[in-house]
Amino acid sequence: MRLTSKYETIRRILSDFKQPEYRYAQIMDAIFKQNISQYERMTILPKFLRDELTRMLGPNVCSIVPVKELTSKQVSKVLFAIAGDERVEAVRLTYERGWKSYCISTQCGCGFGCRFCATGTIGLKRNLTADEITDQLLHFRLNGHALDSVSFMGMGEALANPHIFDAVRILTDPHLFGLGHRRITISTIGLLPGIDKLTREFPQVNLTFSLHSPFDDQRSELMPINDRFPIPDVLEALDRHIRQTGRKVYIAYILLRGVNDSAAHAEAVAELLRGRGPGEHLYHVNLIPFNSTEVTPDSYRQSDPDRIKAFVRILKSKGIKITVRTQFGSDINAACGQLYRSE
């Protein structure tokens, strides 16, 4: 069942009250240009309309409530309360040049149980609605922060939540957030139906595939989803994505000391990505240093710097494009794989 977003509800209220066409634009202008966070304060609207918006949608434009914020040098992590007394986290990263990037949650918890991820230890509580997903960004927007780019790499597996596609529609709607498709990145552990749907509906949105091991048996151990969608099948879907969109595909790879950071692993990653046809130059590997938390197993540690360098050297020598991700926010448990709605 598809839930209507608050933006659709506002349109319906306006039509029920036979309001002129320009009212919707006035409300969106109040939210997205003037940062007005309560319907009551939209004084350009007649009082009966403000009352009706408040009655139907609650007093606040944002449906989720920030309960705690942790800040370190370039990172801010916000814990939000959502309906049902659950919690989700979102992260804002500020780069040296002032670019602001956001890491947003799509589920409360996650049901896929990847062994090295803190969020997976919670299990899946529920999918977030399109409003709850986009309100994480609206919170920052209403507080005066520019939204330069967004990645769905917070809590949960984005493509397991059917509301993700409505959320992307809201974010890219020129009357609402107005984000360019290429400023949005969706990260997946390899859910084939979702990858194919993304290729069809949002070909310009960036796609990241979490690989973490080039060997099917080991990947199944680290990431049980691999039994359902093994590496060769996912790579075929990614090849299709590249053919149809002409866009880069990112391969995320968390380096775990003594687990998946050997020379043999690097060779095998290169082997997977080479000889994939005319689009193979559009694969780009993002190496991510592992971040531990108190709920991830002690057996997982960050690779030592020499191991990382050797891994990079092998991939480069095989002509693979590669970036080692700089880590932000590990001091406040806001880095990759660390989001865990702790109080």
Image: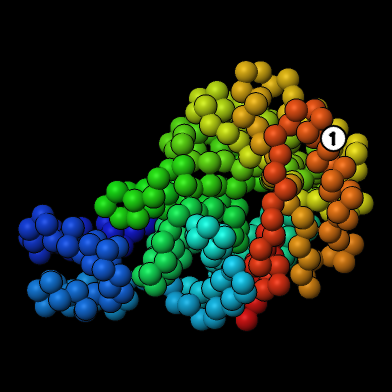
Number of on-image labels: 1
Q: Which residue is mark 1?
A: 314
Residue drawn at x 46%, y 42% is: 182
Left or right: 178 with respect to 106? left
Residue 316 position, x and y percent, is 78, 33
Residue drawn at x 8%, y 61% is: 19
Residue 278 found in image quarter: top right
Residue extending furthest toward the front: 97
Left or right: 99 with respect to 284? left
Residue 170 position, x and y percent, is 36, 52
Quadrant for the C terminus in the image = bottom right
Q: Is residue 206 above or below residue 142?
A: above
Q: Is residue 87 visible?
A: no
Q: Is residue 62 visible?
A: yes
SS assignment at label 1 = helix
Q: Identify which residue, 266 or 305, lies in the foreground.
A: 305
Mark 1 nearby-residue class (10 Å; few <14, some 14–19, many ≥20): some
Q: What is the basis of the colouring in this image?
A: rainbow
Q: Name which residue type carries label 1.
A: Ile
Left or right: 11 with respect to 60? left
Residue 296 position, x and y percent, is 79, 66
Left or right: 182 with respect to 52? right
Residue 15 position, x and y percent, is 13, 58
Q: Identify which residue, 274 or 4, lies in the foreground.
A: 274
Q: Is residue 327 above or below residue 67?
A: above
Q: Identify which residue, 270 or 38, lies in the foreground.
A: 270
Residue 10 found in image quarter: bottom left
Residue drawn at x 56%, y 37% is: 195
Residue drawn at x 50%, y 60% is: 98
